[in-house]
Image (tube, coloured by chain):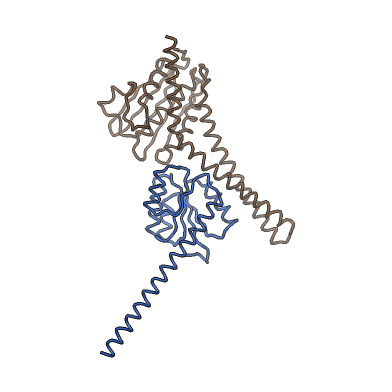
Amino acid sequence: MENNGRPVVLLVDDEEMVITSVRAYLSLEADYDLQGFTTPESAIAFMQANPFDVVVSDYLMPKINGIQLLRSAKESAPEASRILLTGHSDKQSAIEAINEVALFQYIEKPWDNQQLLLAIQGGVERTRLLRDLRDKIAELASANESARDVQRRLIRAFL
Amino acid sequence: MEDAAKLEALVIEEHKFASLGRLLAGIVHEINTPIGSIFSNNEVILRSLELLRKDLMDCSPTSLARARQIVDTCRSLAQVDKIACDRIALVVRGLRVFARTADVEFRPVDLGEQIANTLKLVHGEFRRRVTFETEIEDLPQVVCNAGKINQVLLNLIVNAGQAIEGEGRITITARREADQVHVAIADTGPGIPVELRDRIFRAGFTTKNAGEGTGLGLNISKRIIEEIHHGSLTFESEPGEGTTFHMKIPIGAASGE
């Protein structure tokens, strides 16, 4: 799912400075359509109305935490890759994230830019492969259906 | 007798660091975010300077336009760094004031400043679910032991934050009342059940889970305010409407130690 060919990456953090810093880095190193949100609510509204490839979310945010946000991302776009970027490094939230929202990557703050970029690149790649796979399965199912149709007609013609 | 006094001082000091320890996760989170930004910005600025150098050597209209853009980016990142450094400095300043163990003497203290410092420490732990409101009048300086008063403030504010289930508000007011300063810390928690009210200042009494409290906080706070500063520490509580702790300290409090 792309915007003029550019993968759509969502970054959700209630700290504006994180969005500014990551945006500056990614604009230098990659070509993504980066959508930054400082409230989980605005990110959820975007996800429900727009396609996206990767979502990177902080954990501790007011009202809705990162896992709840990623759960909502999973409902909106199951194939999009989900990354948790957190300064709140406790094992419990990591386990919950991995098990409940099928987390793609878990990154701790202070983050390493290259590690974050690799995670996003990997996430975009994974999302594309999943979408290709889904399309191929659909094509295969459709081809299979056509073949069955031909088979049915042949049977009718000869019997 | 002297040994008993030393032991008591030690218990109070140990308790102070135990309370701080429990806030550490919030403090670390509060610092990790700006540090992450500074690291990232530093990397971007270094890379940008390389690009800028190339653009300036090239000197074509396109590269000069890009150079201007790079300068703008670097300027905005430097502004973010300033904000990030301020954030870290605030937390560290709060910690330094709190951790000053040598501060055993009574001296004139601005209680408004102590409240602000304490709030910096609890900010990370509670800010996502608790709104803090402060109404601090122009206060006279109070002769007190700043380290110990900070310990009481931290204790009362953390208790208020822990009492609030989910979202809520803590209101801190401070005003002069005749020859004393009155600090009130009000939470929007569920209130203290009537049957527990007689016991909350007793040593060892706690309703908190293991790891959240020792059952000594309010007992130590009451001793600090009433025995050491000759003030008073009381509370009022309405079931379902929250609890307010009232701390009153004489402006010219003399050491009771």
Residue at the spot 36% in from the left edge and 52% down from the top edge = A100
Q: Considering the image in quadrants, where does the N terminus of chain B appear? A: top left
- From what the image shows, is residue B61 above or below residue B194? below
Where is residue B106 shown, x and y percent of the image? 50, 16
Along the line of sight, the residue nearer the viewer: B50 or A139: A139
Q: Is residue B118 left or right of residue B189?
A: right
Where is residue A37 shown, x and y percent of the image? 47, 52
- From what the image shows, is residue B46 above or below residue B171? below
Determine the residue located farthest toward the bottom in the rendered image.
A158
Along the line of sight, the residue nearer the viewer: A67 or B152: A67
Where is residue A119 shown, x and y percent of the image? 50, 55
In the figure, residue B131 lies in which quadrant?
A: top left
Identify by letter the chain in brown: B
Residue at the spot 57% in from the left edge and 39% down from the top edge = B85
Where is residue B49 shown, x and y percent of the image? 67, 51
- From what the image shows, is residue B82 above or below residue B207? below
Residue at the spot 59% in from the left edge and 41% down from the top edge = B82
Q: Considering the image in quadrants, where does the C terminus of chain B appear? A: top left
Identify by letter the chain in blue: A
Along the line of sight, the residue nearer the viewer: B195 or B7: B7
Determine the residue located farthest toward the top in the rendered image.
B1
In the figure, residue A153 lies in which quadrant?
A: bottom left
Number of labelled discs?
A: 0
